[in-house]
């Protein structure tokens, strides 16, 4: 599967999935396909039961176009990549939308296959197709170069407060 | 009105609204109270009719707890401050939530009254009350000091792509 490039990144070559791999929206049975283990490459996931997992997928789906989570599945039917985009409706720019890319994770043994690039391209394309005028994401400074390869540029600083 | 401080910012003094000012969720009739003019302090708003404005408020309300937009109203019943928090449900950290603060704007002639600080404190408190483990926002590097006064700290870089 080839994902066509969008926006500023359209001068760059589109990433291709390796033979036998697919990319598609997350589904409840991805619980058994190791999606949480893949997500644990990124950060702490904790104990999530299948009903709890199913409840998050259902809750996301109840918000129309707001949430899209994509998974990359390998030839052994295992989830090796996962990432989300959240579409936000604003008042500014004549009631415009923006996309927030969140929680990109590629399984450690799958590095070097450009799966991260393909996931970002695919989520960015969804943002563009849903009418966003821009897509934003926050990253560690060490990953800035990767996102520049995906067509992104630095726009500001991420600030946080934790409870 | 005093907004109690939350999280890391609870060592700092809580901001107080000037006499006669109120802070509350946005409503459709704020269209006539100059909310779009206040938002235009931040960025381009464009032509938005009252039905279009009402439609955004209605769309936000249809997403349960996802969107909260607060306005600060002065003694002349004019909106002099506006800001939003979007609550995102995640899988990571045992199906945790985070808040995204967006589109903070204080009318130019209202600077120096700590309305920005009060708005950020109020939106942050909403994030905490709705069960977020953190609240994030993106800012221009020149505003970093202001957000540090609000109890925030730098967490990463904001990257964007525009269409």
Image: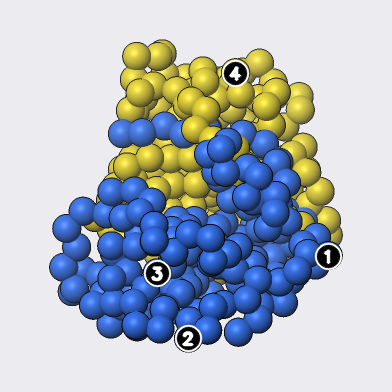
Chain colours: A blue, B yellow
Circle 3 is placed at which residue position?
Answer: A80
Nearer the camera: disc 3 or disc 4: 3
Which quadrant does the C terminus of chain B fall into? bottom right
Report how far apart the C-alphas of labels 3 and 2 lie in the structure.
12 Å
Residue at x-position 60% and y-position 84%: A1
Chain letter of disc 4 in the image: B
Give neighbour class at mark 4: few <14, some 14-19, many 20+ (Cα, 10 Å). few
Report how far apart the C-alphas of labels 3 and 4 lie in the structure.
40 Å
Res. B145 mark: 4
Contact between marks 3 and 4 (CB within 8 A): the answer is no
Circles 4 and 2 on the same chain: no
Circle 1 is placed at which residue position?
Answer: A11
Q: Is residue A84 above or below residue B155?
A: below
Q: Earlier in the sequence, mark 1 or mark 2?
A: 1
Circles 3 and 1 on the same chain: yes
Nearer the camera: disc 4 or disc 1: 1
Q: Does residue B31 appear in this view?
A: no
Q: Residue A108: x percent and y percent?
A: 39, 57
Report how far apart the C-alphas of labels 3 and 1 lie in the structure.
27 Å
Local SS, label 1? helix
Q: Residue A4: x percent and y percent?
A: 72, 77
Give neighbour class at mark 2: few <14, some 14-19, many 20+ (Cα, 10 Å). few
Nearer the camera: disc 1 or disc 2: 2
Give neighbour class at mark 1: few <14, some 14-19, many 20+ (Cα, 10 Å). few
Res. A20 mark: 2
Q: Earlier in the sequence, mark 3 or mark 2?
A: 2
Circles 1 and 2 on the same chain: yes
Chain letter of disc 3 in the image: A
Local SS, label 4? helix
Q: Is residue A128 above or below residue A151?
A: below
Drawn side of residue B92 relative to residue B117, left or right = left
């Amino acid at each position: 599967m080839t994902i066509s490039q969008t926006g500023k990144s359209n001068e760059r070559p589109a990433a291709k999935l390796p033979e036998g791999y697919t990319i598609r929206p997350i589904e409840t049975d991805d619980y058994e396909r190791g999606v949480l283990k893949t997500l644990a490459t990124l950060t702490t996931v904790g104990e999530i039961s299948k009903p709890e997992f199913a409840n998050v997928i259902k809750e996301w789906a109840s918000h129309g176009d707001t949430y899209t989570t994509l998974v990359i599945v390998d030839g052994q039917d295992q989830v090796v990549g996962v990432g989300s985009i959240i579409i936000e409706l604003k008042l500014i720019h004549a009631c415009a939308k923006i996309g927030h890319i969140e929680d990109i994770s590629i399984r450690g043994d799958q590095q070097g296959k450009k799966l991260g690039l393909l996931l970002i391209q695919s989520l960015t394309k969804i943002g563009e197709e849903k009418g966003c005028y821009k897509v934003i994401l926050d990253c560690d400074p060490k990953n800035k170069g990767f996102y520049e390869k995906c067509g992104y540029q630095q726009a500001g600083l991420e600030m946080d407060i934790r409870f």
